[in-house]
Image (cartoon, rainbow, N blue to C red):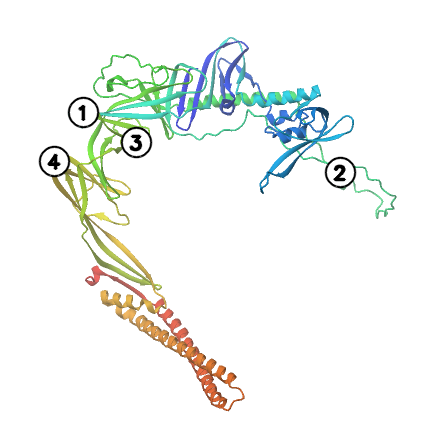
Amino acid sequence: MRKVVLYKNGVGYFEHAGTVSGNQRVTIDFTSSQLNDVLQSLTVLDGGGGRIGGVNYNSTTPLAEQLKTLSLGMSDDPSSTELFQALRGQRVEVAGGPGGTMTGRLMSIESRTEKAGTGDDTVDKYYLTLVAGSGAVKVIELTPALSVRPLDGNLQGQLDRYLELLSSTHSTGLRHLTLDALGQGQRELQVSYISEVPVWKSTYRIVFPREATGKATMQGWAVVDNTVGADWDDVKLSLVAGAPQSFIQPLSQPLYSRRPEIPIAMLVETTPQTHEAADNKEFDKVGLSAKLASPPPVMAPQALKSNNQAFMAGNLQSNQQLRNNSQAQSIVVTGRDEEIPTDQGEISASLDGVGGGVYRASDAIKEGDVSTNAFDDFFEYALAAPVTIHKNESAMVPILQRDLPAEHVTLWSETNPTPLRAVWLENNSKLTLDSGSFSIFESGEFAGEGLLDPIHPGEKRLLSYATDQAVRVKVIGRPGNRKLHHVSIRKGVIIETHMDVAGVTYSATNSADVDRVVLMEHMRRTNGWTLDEGLKAEETTPDLYRFKVPVAAHSTAKLEIRERGPEVTTVTLEANAGQTNYLLDLVKRVPDALEKLKPVIDAQMALADLDQRIAASKKAEETAAADEARDRENLTALKGNDAAKRFVDELNHAEDQLQATRKQTADLEQQKEAAVEKLNELIAGISFDWSATEKGGAS
């Protein structure tokens, strides 16, 4: 093994290289779990005019298919009932029962539900039915003390074979991949593939000097685990921060296609028949020949072999061309400007088990130990010195040492009001810092830790690592005003545009003995909003402004932020009496709109009056209906009585009153429909445009 490249998506690229002579077979061992990835990605290049005659590996038949070769007919997860079902009809010896040892043929196994004790609880019991040689049928309860032994030696062998197959599924074993390298003389053979590996992890140390210089030493480590079952002896190790798309296909598993089962055609005897004569005397030869299908061409075995060889040669040539065209641009990490002192010489990543830490930043790495390759959307850390990591061991590999601009700040946001100690780190190197954990060391002591997202060259990033208990920030005022700027009415829609001025005042108090720089995060408004002239944020993100506020020890500092921008209100005019108050308020703020809106306001008021009259008419209708019903009930109760005559007159009057109120309600409803139609026409015909800059403004 010569090269190992580990990716963040849990796969690794492995490259073997060696010399072959003449026709030679080369074997590489893999585990069964690796083989699927290997078959999906294996690339073999035989230099010096050689070619690969074939790739073979020891295959395994799936357990389900192997079990089909046994006559037991049991699955790979059988129950005791399924086992006894498989023994039906076989001669067995039953011992441990109440009748002593018995022999016979096992006919069946059945379950019975019986009461347990004197209560209502039940229990399932199983019984074997045994037919003795004499013909006697015996039913025996299946208890833990009962033993059943097959008497047929062939059946016992089937059971042993079945258990062996089950046991074989638990052993992973090695799969031997054999390559046939065909050619003449000595040649270089290169084999590469991908395999599933643990994800490599990034972790960083940010060390500040005792005297502030505006910089900090950024030290990066990669935690690498070798679990592939082979030693990495003096390999060229690269770590790629990126996740190329990858998946697993069960290529190493033999697959069996389901075929339809077609019943055998049975001969159907026919009875004598008579047939009609043809109209013309000659057959239609053209029509007959059109019904005959020509057989498909058959390719000779030699042609198939030639095609396969041409296909493999084309693939090898394409792979070589792809490798030549995908060379990444190499960027050498220069480290700090001054020479980094080191007394360790070349870096050795050969560690027993887990790698240890370092005591000085300069002990980790020196100039030229790591280079980076940028390709596509990924970036790579390539170690210059060979690395040795034995199988089932892990190591910490140094990947970065660089002095970067760093500033201590206290980060505060209204959405997260707890002040945080943070480092404002600028990546002025040509390296991309991968995501991972980091630890901060100040004045030789641990100060906190946190997480960082990928930081590309030229980016500046805030890294919070502790709570700042000495700083308190609060909002002490939100001044603002609003002024109507523009009103337009088109197709029944009123659009009001206001120019708003919003402000907020923050107060930061520092109770520490040293000065602080508080970085205030303020939510950023979009859609045309801007900061007032003379106010500039230290940094702007898509959602935030960041302002630096120096706060001396044991003092308080304030920050006032003022923004201005448009706010749009949209109202859809409808035949709705509830909008009258809004329109009256609008014409007060924009008197020029009165001429356009007065007909609408009058129509809405008339509509409101109609609504009140309809409501009163319906209430009178309900009263008249109640009076009519009451008089009808009284008349029914006094039927045949002299007093009933008076209720007849009252009933007639009540019915007349009910009919009148119903007619009045119907008339009012018709008037409302006409008023709504008229109001909709008025709304649709309004066209109005007003601007405060042209008309002198309106409040």
Residue ID for mark 4: 553
Mark 4 → mark 1, Cα distance in angstroms:
20 Å
Which sits in the foreground, 358 or 579? 358
Circle 3 — which element? strand
Disc 3 and disc 2 in contact, CB within 8 angstroms: no
Disc 3 marks a residue whose amino acid type is: Leu
Residue occupying image coordinates x 51% and y 83%: 637
Which sits in the foreground, 376 or 173? 173
**On screen, residue 178 above or below 264:** above
- For discs 4 and 2, the disc positioned in front in the rendered view: 4
- For discs 2 and 1, the disc positioned in front in the rendered view: 1
Residue 240 shown left or right of residue 273 in the figure: left
Residue ID for mark 3: 451
Circle 1 — which element? loop
Disc 3 and disc 1 in contact, CB within 8 angstroms: no
Q: Could you classify mark 1 by the number of other residues whose Cα lies within 10 Å: few (under 14), some (14-19), or many (20 or more)?
A: few
